[in-house]
Image (cartoon, rainbow, N blue to C red):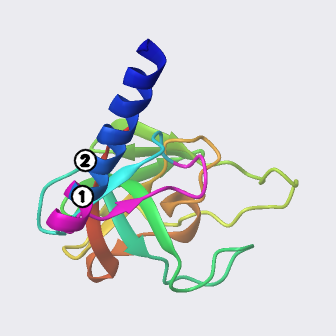
Amino acid sequence: MKRYASMAFTLATVAFFYLAIKISDLHFVVPESESVSGNLFLLQNKNTSNDYVVFEYEKAPYKNYQKGKLFIKKIGCDSGQHLDIQNNKIFCNDKLIAVALDKNREGEILNKIDFTGTIPQDEFFALGEHPMSYDSRYFGLVNKKDVKNTARRIF
């Protein structure tokens, strides 16, 4: 009897969330890589404040990353903040936020961001949480016009 009650509860829960999503027009995204910690993100309007942003990759193609691909990253350093790079260590307002690698997993040399100074008004430094994330350490600053949504990590 407990087994059927448990199955009924599971089905009711799934049905509830399915209807909630359909009625409220919620949108979710699952990251394709280990770049950020989290397996499911709720997309929100891009004018809400949040740590994660979804943006279109608009840089030169690299591996399987082509123009127009959607990325989920954190804002590691935002407009008006000071970005400084010293010996592959990347600092935002004097706080260490990342270390750029010299080579990728295959041993290929990585191009690295060449920028020190105040981040311009309409740009930000996108940062993945995985040490080998392909992010602004390698492709540079992201223009805020390329941001499509903010995202909230569900789990």
Viewer-closest of 89 and 74:
74
Q: Is residue 142 visible?
A: yes
Q: Is residue 51 visible?
A: no
Give the residues drawn in magenta, as a range: 20-35
Q: Is residue 98 magenta?
A: no
Q: Residue at x 49, y 62 (%)?
A: 136
Circle 2 sits in a helix, a strand or a loop, which is it?
helix
Q: Residue furthest top?
A: 2
Image quarter in which the C terminus is found:
top left
Near mark 1 (Cα within 10 A), the count class, few <14, some 14-19 or many ≥20, is few
Viewer-closest of 134 and 109:
134
Q: Position of residue 134 (x, y in %)?
A: 60, 59
Viewer-closest of 82 and 68:
68
| Figure check: 120 above or below 103 | below
Q: Residue at x 57, y 41 (%)?
A: 130
Q: Position of residue 13 (x, y in %)?
A: 31, 39
| Figure check: 142 above or below 18 | below
Circle 1 sits in a helix, a strand or a loop, which is it?
helix
For residue 26, side relative to residue 41 (left or right): left
Q: Quadrant of residue 107?
A: bottom right
Per the model, the C-alpha gap separating discs 1 and 2 is: 5 Å
Check contact, mark 1 vs mark 2: CB within 8 A. yes
Say the numbered circle drawn on residue 10.
none
Q: Position of residue 72 (x, y in %)?
A: 43, 60
Q: Residue at x 54, y 58 (%)?
A: 137
Q: Amino acid at mark 2?
A: Phe
Query: What residue is disc 1 on?
Result: 19
Q: Amino acid at mark 1?
A: Leu
Query: What residue is disc 2 on?
Result: 16
For residue 117, side relative to residue 6 (left or right): left
Near mark 2 (Cα within 10 A), the count class, few <14, some 14-19 or many ≥20, is few
Q: Is residue 21 magenta?
A: yes
